[in-house]
Amino acid sequence: MTAQTITLGCRLNFAESEAMAANAPDGLLIVNSCAVTGEAVRQTRQSIRRAHRDNPARPIIVTGCAAQLDPQAFGAMPEVTEVRTRDHALPARAAAGLIHQVKSFVAVQTGCDHRCTFCTIWTARGPSRSMPYGEVRRAIEREIGRGAKEIVLTGVDITDYTGGLGILCQRLLADIQTLLRLRLSSLDSVEIDGALLKLIAGEPRLMPHFHLSLQAGDDLILKRMKRRHLRRDAVAVVEAIKKARPDATIGADLIAGFPTESEEAALNTLALLDDCDVVAAHIFPFSPRPGTPAAKMPQVERELVKARAARLRGHAEQRRSTWLDGLICSRQRVLVENERGHGHGESNAPVLLDGAGKGSIAHATITGRKDNHLIGTFQ
């Protein structure tokens, strides 16, 4: 029995999980934990207990951010064989992990030098460190050799990549002609530079979907979060992206119910969905993380946090639905990611193509929509 993983949280975790599983002894179950919210920690514990119930004899190794922050608590769980914490050193090679053998996440950076008041990830992962360019290039070439058609660069704060994320992408696309599609994971909008905007404008192999770590749309809340941008900065960077590439789509992370958030502040965040033309939102109800400054601030009543998160989520889903409907009758280049014909267009729209071969990049006409997926035909 080969080693298996249960991964919670970000794309960086998924990339690291694949690298760990490839080098782990047979029979192990590795749980790669997440600590971004209290709910993520709860889900990690739940996953451990479920995995043990399903196979009581299988050794369970717990790693990741939640284990890093509280190794004693996870070590005390009777289901856990061992807790392994990181030493904050970079791996010897860039972590990479395949999804359906055609899309691969490649970690180019880890750690964070910023101190957002709600976050513990900088504690769990340590200071920002970037993989050397040569290692990143070799990791991507290795994944392409294994069948990957799309590479997603990931990390904790990839816009902090040494030398600039835009320069890194320029070099990769120039040096690796077999790199057909390059996609970026979550970006800190304040660090998007001219080199990246130039690439967005002129490089068709860079996929035109950009997920921004915005968190809030109210200046006072952004300051209390200790974010490095204001509302107008977020709007301006989206305008710059859209000017560079009009067909670009925007995703965003947003927190509902941050401590001291007034109704006016909450409405400012709600309006940011429209002002930044967000079509893919990740909405997080605020949950205090022990030891963070935000946990010591006056908290918003829990039911109100949930209600504001639901309102944000509802508006985001309405915007996404309108966007998907607007793509009907359009032509899309779709990477088919599995045998069922499921894939994504360049704008990251999910598409189902009946009869399309896994790993193909199909020129599809969008004929309709079923639930959250577009339906396409191809030639």
Image (cartoon, rainbow, N blue to C red):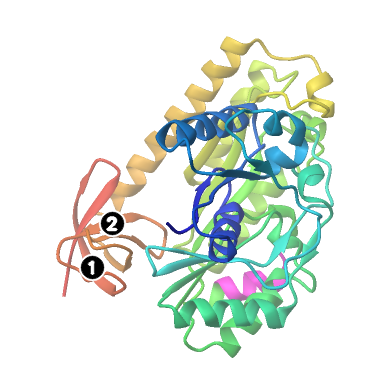
Secondary structure type for disc 2: strand
Q: Given the image, on which type of amino acid does mark 2 rest?
A: Val
* Image quadrant occupied by the N terminus: bottom left
Q: Given the image, on which type of amino acid does mark 1 rest?
A: Ala
Q: Residues within 10 Å of mark 2 (few under 14, many from 20)?
A: many
Which x, y percent locates residue 105? 53, 64
Q: Residue at x 30, y 43 (%)?
A: 372
Q: Residue furthest front?
A: 57
Q: What residue is pinned by disc 1?
A: 364
As displayed, is residue 76 above or below residue 278? above
Camera-side residue: 128 or 68?
68
Q: Is residue 197 magenta?
A: yes
Which of the two labelled residues, at mark 1 and mark 2, occupies the earlier sequence position?
2
Camera-side residue: 124 or 298?
124
Secondary structure type for disc 1: strand
As displayed, is residue 244 above or below residue 52? below
Which x, y percent locates residue 146? 44, 78
* Image quadrant occupied by the C terminus: bottom left
Residue 339 visible in the displayed image: yes
Q: Left or right of 299: which side holds 325?
A: left
Q: What residue is pinned by disc 2?
A: 351
Q: Residue at x 23, y 63 (%)?
A: 339
Which x, y percent locates residue 82? 67, 42
Badge 1 vs badge 2, beta-carbon distance below 8 Å: yes
Camera-side residue: 310 or 102?
102
Residue interval drawn in magenta: 192-200
Residue 228 visible in the displayed image: no
Q: Is residue 219 magenta?
A: no
